[in-house]
Image (spheres, helix red, strand yellow):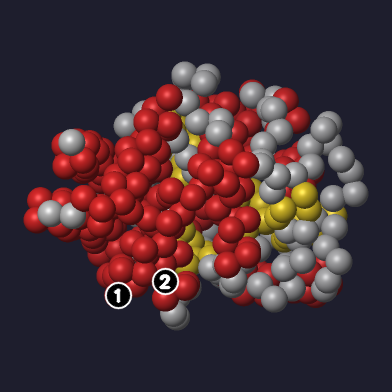
Amino acid sequence: MFEIIFLTAAGIYFIQLFLFLASATKKYTRLGEDKLPSITIIVASRNEESNIGKCLVSLDNLIYPEGKIEIIMVNDKSTDGTGRIIEDFIHGKDKFKLITTHKTIGNLRGKTNALANALEIAKGEVILTTDADCEVSPAWAKSIASYYQDGVAMVCGYTTQEATNNFEGMQTLDFIFLLTVASGTMNLNMPLSCIGNNMSYRKSVYDEVGGYESIPFSITEDFKLLKTIFKLKKYKIIWPLDEDALVTSQPCKDYKTLYWQKKRWGVGGLDSDLNGFLVMASGFISHVAILVSPFFFSANVLYMILFKLATDFLFLYPILKNFRLTSKLGYFLSFQLYYIIYVIALPLMVLVSRKVIWKGRSY
């Protein structure tokens, strides 16, 4: 009986990942440089003095038609030197603006309120967001904006992470794995997730849904906005596989921060639809089967475990190859151990409590 359950779960898991991978590599038509829309880049920063400098340099190095780009840096009530670092850097740079979140919009809190403050004054036709602990490539904005053909309301991109050890490396592979699932489902017109540090949307569509203040508050504001725009059923939402659109972020530095990051995503994921829960269920059952497999061990069980590992490896490889990151596969075994543990533990963490502590704030 165990072998049948494991085989069924592993089969469904394989079919899902095959479909997601095929969809994630879908090609999209792009605009010429003369047709690129005006853009506003928004970065909300809270106590990021150790990271904000690299972020600012990468934003300053962006290649985009002159007069069509503005960058709004939001100091979200930082208690460290974040605001001063931004002020010093952007002095004399006209494309940058700095605001501080003194105003609360509606019932918004935290990062969502910071973004809403910036969106009130944003002038670009397309909004791009990234985080203060991220670095973007010079072609990032140009690449993302080039996908805004008529009817496209949202374009998302991939994020990788810096990695110098197993703890950081397992997070890097986890990011790419989850974002490929998100990309694949989005391109199949059943979006399940997105990530705010590499996200963009039309300002007119954001206004059409009433802005963040008209959307029920969520600790994962990016996912909530995605769902709200998707429910309009009148626009395209896409996730291209584009090396120029890749963003690099900092990994969590310790297990405590990683715990709260995963729990924040888990709590936000409770807003998923049936498709989302079915995808999560497939992974959960497959990993539970691996965890209890020593109690039902046989040659067939071993083959199924190896099959599952091979499926994950082959799912990651073409995406990493596209981004020229195949060296990260050296962390594959660390990622697999980590993946098994948190996929099983996360639902339990969320069921016990939905409290989340993030960036010094409790939700």
User: Seen in the image, is 35 located left or right of residue 261?
Assistant: left
Within 10 Å of the Cα at label 1, are there few (<14), some (14-19), or many (20+) other Cα atoms? some
Q: Residue furthest right?
A: 102
Instruction: Write the residue at 34% across / 47% down.
Output: 288
- Where, quadrant-wise, is the C terminus in this rendering? top right
| Vertical side of 272 occupied by 336: above or below | below
Contact, mark 1 vs mark 2 (Cβ under 8 Å): yes
Q: Quadrant of residue 201?
A: top right
Q: Nearer the viewer, residue 105 or 17?
A: 17
Gap between marks 1 and 2 measured at Cα: 8 Å
Mark 2 element type: helix
- Amino acid of disc 1: Gly
Residue 4, horizontal then vertical, whole percent: 16, 37
Residue at 59%, 72% in the rendered image? 253
Left or right of residue 95: residue 289: left
Where residue 190 appears, as percent x and y from the top left, is 39, 29
Q: Reading the chain from its start, which is encountered first: label 1 or label 2?
A: 2
The foreground one among 130 and 294 is 294
Residue on which the image places disc 1: 330
Secondary structure of residue under mark 1: helix
Q: Quadrant of residue 353?
A: top right
Query: Foreground: 90 or 73?
Result: 73
Q: Which mark is residue 169?
A: 2
What is the quadrant of residue 244 in the picture? bottom left
Which percent across, then down, holds residue 202? 57, 35
